[in-house]
Each structure stands twice: as structure tokens, then as C-alpha cells.
């Protein structure tokens, strides 16, 4: 068991969830305020996407990232900042011509994905380690893009969180490490229960953690009703955990949640198992993060 896990809160995500839960934050002010509340509830790390303030849909606008991060940094609450760098990978084949992207396709180059990270230099940013069937679309991240993106992250001095949706993506992450594009003491995030990636269960966690280097750090999260069970399972197996409205909208069946409430519940679970959530400063020391 991990007696001192890191607890991340994924604040808003990029999915069409704002009509399903009114507490999913949309504007930079709302995202920052929700992040601060999660930090005060015990989150070590906040994981950030941004949304179009008018429509609530996902956005890649660097200025929205800048306003959100600035608001969090200027607050009186310490928290590690983790910015997504995985946007712009959605491919939906056109029904008229499957060789072309149809409605819902949203593709960015590695350099475009990296722009907010290069500008804001958060302590952590995500690196999604491969392509995957994601619902009825494809998330695209071929090896050439991954190598380019990993190199940009390394040059920036930001710690990559290696998001792995299946075991093949762990192999890819390990290959990036062998090529010198990802440094030692890798940070893995096992993303479980997403259709159609790795399952959210104890056996999957056990196998995935067996495939990473011994000196690595790792966490796992589950989506929907699997969120809290995976908090417990991940910590019991020696990892860290993640909660938040990006991955789950409910506190319990039929009861909508806030990020603060989900963080609170995860802290309670960890404490009930005999653990204590790591502080932001402890996480910086453990992961060798650079605070800006």
C-alpha cells in the first residue's frame, strides 16, 4: 500500500458534460476557483483543460490557459499545476469520404499542443502515449508525433505525465525513455475504463504496474462509477489516485458532485485505509518538479 499517495483532481475535462452537471466549470475564473476549492479539500495536483466561455465546448486557446493558470498561481492556496497537452487528436472519419475528417475532427500538431505548456511552464503536463479507439472516434497520436512532443516537453523542463490507456502505450512510453526523450523516474497515469481502452479493475492495474521501470511513479483513475473504487485499489497496490469532474459527474448514484466533494471523498477513502495524501511541496520533492 502507498501510505503517502499523490491525489490529483481533473477539474473540467473536454467532454460534453456541462449540460449534465451545472458544477462543471467553464470559464477561466470558474476553473481556477474550482481548482482552489479542490486544493483546499486536499488535492495535491490539479489537472487542467480549458473551455470556450461562450459555448462550454473544449478549447485550445493559449490565452484561456494563461488566465486560468495565473488565477491559480495568484491564489493563497498551494497546488501542483498539471496542464493537458493532449488536445487536438480527435479523428472522426467523414461518412462521405472516410479518408477525410468529418464533423468532430479536431487535429493539432505536437507544436500546437505544446504551446500553452511552453508559455506557462507548469510543473506537469500530460503526454498521451498512443492512439486509441475512443468511443466512436479515434484519438490520434502516432509515434512520430509522440517523439516530437516528448522532445518539446523535455526541452521545456516540465515533467511529463505519461497517460496510458492500454498496455501497448506503456511499451511506447518505455521506448521513449530508452531513446532519451523521457527522463528517469517516469510518471505514469493509468487511464482505466474508457471505451475502448484498458478495463478498470484490480487485475489490469496489477499488470500495468508490472510493465513500468522500477523507479517510476504511477497513479490510476477510473471513470464514472469506477472512480472511487479505483482510488482505493490504486492506493492499495502502491500507486496514487485521481478524481474530478473530468472523469465522473456523481458523488453517488443520482447525486451530482463538485470537484471539492469528490476530492473530499477520495481523501476520506485514503485516510480510512491508513494513508495520508501527499502535500504539494512533498510531491514537488518526490517527483523533482520545478515550481514557477
Image (spheres, rainbow, N blue to C red):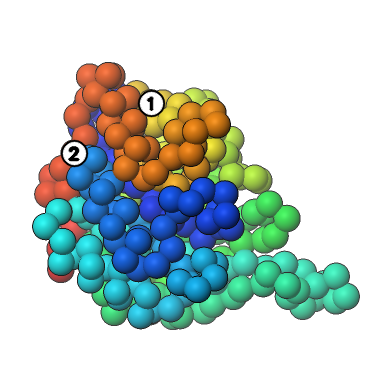
Q: Position of residue 166 (x, y in %)?
A: 56, 45
- Which of the numbered marks, if any, corresponds to residue 232? 1
Nearer to us in this view, 214 or 188: 188
Q: Is residue 240 above or below residue 177?
A: above
Q: Residue 84 — which label? A: none
Q: Residue at x 29, y 74 (%)?
A: 67
Residue under label 2, please give it. Answer: 278
Q: In the image, 161: left or right of 22?
A: left
In percent of width and height, residue 94 lies at 80, 72
| Within-10-Å neighbours for mark 2: few <14, some 14–19, many 20+ | many
44 or 23, which is in the foreground? 23
Q: Residue at x 35, y 61 (%)?
A: 30
* Residue 195 location (% of width, % of height): 64, 45
| Labels 1 and 2 touching (C-beta < 8 A) | no
Q: Residue furthest front?
A: 22
Q: Quadrant of the N terminus?
A: top left
* Residue 162 in view (yes/no): no
Picture quarter containing residue 19?
Answer: bottom right
Q: Judge whether 274 appears above or below 157 on screen.
A: above
Image quarter hosting the C terminus: bottom left
Cα distance in 3D space between marks 1 and 2: 15 Å
Amino acid at each position: 500500500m502507498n501510505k503517502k499517495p499523490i491525489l490529483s483532481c481533473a477539474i473540467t475535462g473536454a467532454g460534453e458534460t456541462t449540460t449534465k452537471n451545472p458544477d462543471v466549470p467553464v470559464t477561466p475564473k470558474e476553473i481556477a476557483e474550482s481548482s482552489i476549492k479542490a486544493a483546499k479539500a486536499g488535492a495535491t495536483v490539479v489537472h487542467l483543460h480549458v473551455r470556450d466561455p461562450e459555448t462550454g465546448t473544449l478549447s485550445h486557446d493559449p490565452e484561456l490557459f494563461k488566465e486560468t493558470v495565473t488565477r491559480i498561481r495568484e491564489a493563497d492556496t498551494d497546488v501542483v499545476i498539471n496542464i493537458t497537452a493532449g488536445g487536438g487528436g480527435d479523428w472522426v472519419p467523414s461518412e462521405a469520404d472516410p479518408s477525410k475528417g468529418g464533423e468532430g475532427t479536431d487535429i493539432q500538431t505536437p507544436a500546437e499542443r505544446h504551446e500553452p505548456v511552453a508559455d506557462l511552464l507548469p510543473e506537469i503536463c500530460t503526454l498521451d502515449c498512443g492512439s486509441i479507439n475512443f468511443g466512436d472516434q479515434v484519438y490520434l497520436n502516432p509515434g512520430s508525433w509522440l517523439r516530437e512532443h516528448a522532445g518539446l516537453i523535455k526541452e521545456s523542463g516540465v515533467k511529463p505525465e505519461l497517460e496510458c490507456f492500454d498496455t501497448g502505450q506503456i511499451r511506447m512510453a518505455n521506448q521513449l525513455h530508452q531513446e532519451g526523450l523521457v527522463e528517469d523516474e517516469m510518471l505514469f497515469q493509468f487511464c482505466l475504463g474508457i471505451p475502448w481502452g484498458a478495463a478498470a479493475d484490480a487485475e489490469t492495474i496489477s499488470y500495468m504496474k508490472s510493465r513500468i521501470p522500477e523507479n517510476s511513479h504511477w497513479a490510476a483513475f477510473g471513470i464514472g462509477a469506477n472512480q472511487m473504487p479505483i482510488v482505493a485499489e490504486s492506493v492499495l497496490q502502491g500507486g496514487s489516485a485521481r478524481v474530478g469532474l473530468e472523469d465522473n459527474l456523481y458523488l453517488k448514484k443520482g447525486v451530482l458532485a463538485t470537484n471539492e466533494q469528490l476530492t473530499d471523498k477520495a481523501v476520506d477513502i485514503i485516510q480510512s485505509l491508513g494513508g495520508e495524501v501527499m502535500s504539494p511541496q512533498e510531491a514537488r520533492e518526490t517527483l523533482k518538479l520545478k515550481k514557477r
